[in-house]
Amino acid sequence: VSRGPFFAANWKMYMDPETARDYANAFELLAEPFVDDAYIALCAPFVCLETLSEELEDSEIGIGAQDCYWEPEGAFTGEISARMLRELVDCCIVGHSERRRLFGETDEMVARKVSALLAQEITPIVCVGESLEENQAGRTAERVTAQVVAGLGHLTDEQRGAIVIAYEPIWAIGTGLADTPESANATIAVIRSAAGGLDQAVMLYGGSMKPGNAEALCRQPNIDGGLVGSASLDPGAFAELIVNGLKGGDAR
Ligand code: 13P
């Protein structure tokens, strides 16, 4: 992936194969006017991936997973490996704050997952972001820098340049209260300088990105697109968000 507009839906634990099929069919039509202007991916629950790969076989729209395990196979009940995903997805979310907070994912696990995905030529979308407490204590830059160094420090500059990073302040996720464009831009500038190779990496903003704020966020020089939760669950809203985000990107 090289720097350019990039919009990923994170469906989280919503949708099933049937609703995913309906969504894909509707979204493919809606996305026709702009599908060549941005890289777009739908990050879906594992059980939807096969359906999406059938429905979107002839489409430019990419498919993503929301997590993976680093070992290629073995006695790891319930896990899905990066190698198993290889034929099904183009990208995979890693280190989402919900996985860190609810399922104990650590920076060390993020680092292993990123390596496993790169080995399978799947683009990792690595999430970083601070809590409300850290934000209020003025520790945002320190927190995201630590996450980048611990999660991506083991890679070469070239490998880091092939990764997508999503800055998702935890207090902005699912709250309707997005970061301001200027503040998100400044934090992403910190992320870009946290390790070598990130100057040309794709950087997304995530956390209550909506059709109404996508243009202003994407007008910022450091923000290449979005990782979108709630607003991605409706194909019309996600399409509108991308159109507005592209307007912002064009204006910068
Ligand atoms: P919302 O867009 O619902 O705030 O979720 C953001 C998110 O967590 C994307 O990964």
Image (cartoon, helix red, strand yellow):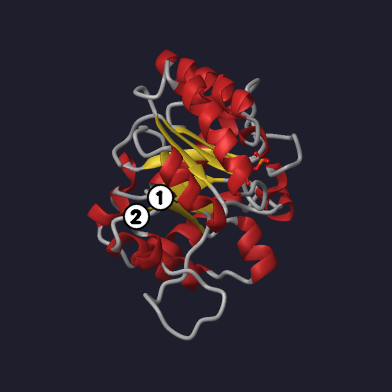
Reply above or below: 93 against 28. below
Q: Earlier in the sequence, mark 2 or mark 1?
A: 1
Q: From where the camera sits, is residue 142 visible? A: no
> What type is the residue that disc 2 sits on?
Ile
Q: Is mark 2 within 8 Å of ligand 1?
A: no
The location of residue 240, given as percent across then percent down, is 58, 20
Is disc 1 placed on a helix, strand or loop? Answer: strand
> In percent of the image, x 36 and y 50: which residue is there?
163
Quadrant of the frame with the N terminus? top left
Asked where in the image residue 38 lies, by quadrant, the reply is top left
> In percent of the image, x 50 and y 61: which residue is there?
146
Relative side of 180 to 203, left or right = right
The location of residue 97, given as percent across then percent down, is 62, 57
> What type is the residue that disc 1 sits on?
Cys
Residue highlighted by disc 1: 91
Of residue 129 and residue 127, the one placed in the foreground of this image is 127
Relative side of 131 to 111, left or right = right
3D distance between C-alphas at marks 2 and 1 = 5 Å
Count of marks, rendered view: 2
Residue highlighted by disc 2: 122
> In percent of the image, x 54 and y 53: which residue is there?
128
Given contact means CB atoms under 8 Å apart, are the residues at marks 2 and 1 in contact? yes
